Image (cartoon, rainbow, N blue to C red):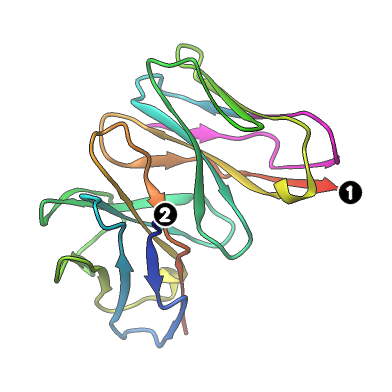
Amino acid sequence: KQEVTQIPAALSVPEGENLVLNCSFTDSAIYNLQWFRQDPGKGLTSLLLIQSSQREQTSGRLNASLDKSSGRSTLYIAASQPGDSATYLCAVQGGSEKLVFGKGMKLTVNP
Amino acid sequence: EPEVTQTPSHQVTQMGQEVILRCVPISNHLYFYWYRQILGQKVEFLVSFYNNEISEKSEIFDDQFSVERPDGSNFTLKIRSTKLEDSAMYFCASRSDPPNQPQHFGDGTRLSIL
C-alpha cells in the first residue's frame, strides 16, 4: 500500500529564503507525482506534475524534482514571498486513477 | 482559466439524512473524482468515474455512497444516510485526456453532520 510522507509538517521562514519541501513515497512504481497548494478553506491548486519518466519540472519560481528509485520528490521555491504562505501537498498516482496524498507541509513566510 | 465548481460551499445536515454534493467539472474533461479530507487528516480518494460508470472506488466508498452524472455538466455525490464520521471537506476533481494530465480540484464542500 502506497504511503506518502511530508516532513516537516510546518515551516516558518523569513521572506526571501530559498526553500526545499520534501516528499517521500514507499512504492516507487508510480505513474506521476503532483504538487498542490492549499490555502485555508480553499481547494487544491495544482502547481506541478512530474511524469515518472521525468526528473524535474519548472514553473516560475517553483521547481520540482523526482527520484523515483529512491522514492523522493522535492519542491524548490526560490526567493520566497509572504504570498507563498499555504499548505503544500504532494500526491502520487500509481497504477490506477487515484491520487495518494501526503499530509502536507504548512509554510509560513514572514515579511 | 476554467475551474471546477462545487456547491454548496457548506452543508449542515442532521445525522441519518441524505445529502447531495454537486460539482461542475471543467467542460472538456472526461474523468471525474471525489476525494474527502477529514479535519487534520490527509486527503483521501473516494471514487473515480469515466464514461458514465465508476472506474475505481476505495473501501470508504460503501453502499451509502453513490455518484451520478445526471446531465452533460453536473457530477454529484450522494450520501444516503449520513453519519457523524462523514463530516469532512469533500473535493471534486476532473482531468482531461491523455492520462498524464493533472487532476484539477474544486474549492470543496464542507459537510457538517449534527
Under mark 1, the amino acid is: Pro
Image coordinates of residue A12 in percent, x first then y, are: 82, 43
Image coordinates of residue B85 in percent, x first then y, are: 43, 69
Label 2 Cα neighbours within 10 Å, binned few <14 / some 14-19 / many ≥20: many
Numbered label tally = 2
Query: B97 or A53, which lies in front?
Result: B97
Q: Quadrant of residue B11?
A: bottom left
CA distance separating discs 2 and 1:
29 Å
Label 2: which residue? B105
Query: Measuring 41% from the left and 19% from the top, which residue is drawn there?
Result: A28
Image coordinates of residue B67 in percent, x first then y, are: 20, 65
* Residue extent of the magenta highlight: A1-21
Q: Is residue A17 magenta?
A: yes
* Quadrant holding the N terminus of chain B: bottom left
Label 1: which residue? A111
User: Dot 1 lies on which element?
Assistant: loop
Under mark 2, the amino acid is: Phe
